[in-house]
Amino acid sequence: MKNLIKRVLEFRDQRDWKQFHTPENLAKSIVIEAGELLENFQWNTEYNENNVHDELADIMNYCILMADALDVDIVDIMYKKIDKNEKKYPVNKAKGNSKKYTEL
Amino acid sequence: MKNLIKRVLEFRDQRDWKQFHTPENLAKSIVIEAGELLENFQWNTEYNENNVHDELADIMNYCILMADALDVDIVDIMYKKIDKNEKKYPVNKAKGNSKKYTEL
Amino acid sequence: MKNLIKRVLEFRDQRDWKQFHTPENLAKSIVIEAGELLENFQWNTEYNENNVHDELADIMNYCILMADALDVDIVDIMYKKIDKNEKKYPVNKAKGNSKKYTEL
Amino acid sequence: MKNLIKRVLEFRDQRDWKQFHTPENLAKSIVIEAGELLENFQWNTEYNENNVHDELADIMNYCILMADALDVDIVDIMYKKIDKNEKKYPVNKAKGNSKKYTEL
């Protein structure tokens, strides 16, 4: 992961793009790419594999850039969120159930 | 990263949620969470840090689940995409420029 | 509005597209188009006017199709929602304030 | 439609909200609401009707506000877009077919 993050930031810095990467602009970018990912599933589920992989990678890429812009460790905030989710979705209530925690 | 992915999949499997995690449902989930992230920046840039971290983690979480559902290595598809982006955005054309590659 | 709705549904029926227009598929379509609209504002506010108009029209178009798929009158649900919003955002609390009703 | 638009703008002006309604902020708002609409269809199609109507109305509401912020007639841009779509999706090619015009 460290090498991947380094590569993502290097790519950005070589292009002098940090100036555009405010948290707000990156939040917009993530939702824009997420829409493009969803477009593969708009009318049916016969998606193009390579395109789906590319769009998924684009989203991850912007997530890594956003963590950097926010000055947080992305792995760290993910572990913290999983800990929170453990409490929101206790196994005995959530097992086999797709309901939101507010409705469990 | 391996440990993190393991933890994400474990959380899912303990709840027997794989049945809901089709690529299509995960693509929807990513865009839904991305909208929630963007909500922090809807009217101004005075965002709540913890909330932004949580939403970003949710998106990453679904990305990892999606890579698993697609049976691809998430780090692998990211490196491949960066290689593609190197060609789409050559440093000499893209430096300091936020234009899309189709307009460079 | 009646003529516009008639035109939108006629366009759909001439192409025999109603079969694809489940509420779920239309909800996906709206968010996909909304992402395309937002792309005009991704890095700055120098948007292309015609493109913005087109994307906005695409969203409205899918909204009209969705109301038809849900078998509701779109103007009717809008008036009802404005009435709800009157209660959520009383003038004396909301005036000049962009906060969400939960924080007013 | 004229009465509805008048009502939407009146609601905004009573709250002095025009100052927040830049095209960019409204584009963000539309995609945020579109994500909330899609949340009703995240894991299955057993959606809550009232909630779906409300979210759809929210999107339409922001579309009307956006047309006003852009100083265009929303009905006018919709007719123009349908005319464009007529050319992109000729009946003989598009009938019964959900493919994008670039693939027809």
Image (cartoon, coloured by chain):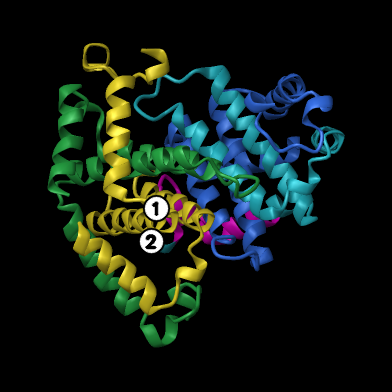
Chain colours: A blue, B cyan, C yellow, D green
Q: Disc 2, disc 1: CB below 8 Å?
A: yes
Q: Determine which quarter of the picture holds residue B51.
A: top right
Who's the residue at 48% across and 48% down the image? Answer: A32
Viewer-side residue, D35 vs C75: C75
- The residue that disc 1 covers is B99
Checking the image for residue D99, the label placed there is: none
Who's the residue at 23% across and 40% down the image? Answer: D65
Give the percent coordinates (x, y) of residue C8: 30, 66
Amino acid type of the residue tagged 2 in the rendering: Glu
- The residue that disc 2 covers is B103
Viewer-side residue, C74 vs A83: C74
Give the percent coordinates (x, y) of residue A52: 64, 59
Viewer-side residue, A8 vs A93: A93
Same subunit, labels 2 and 1: the answer reads: yes
Left or right of residue A26: residue C89: left
Q: Magenta residues? A: B80-101
What is the chief secondary structure element of the magenta stretch? helix
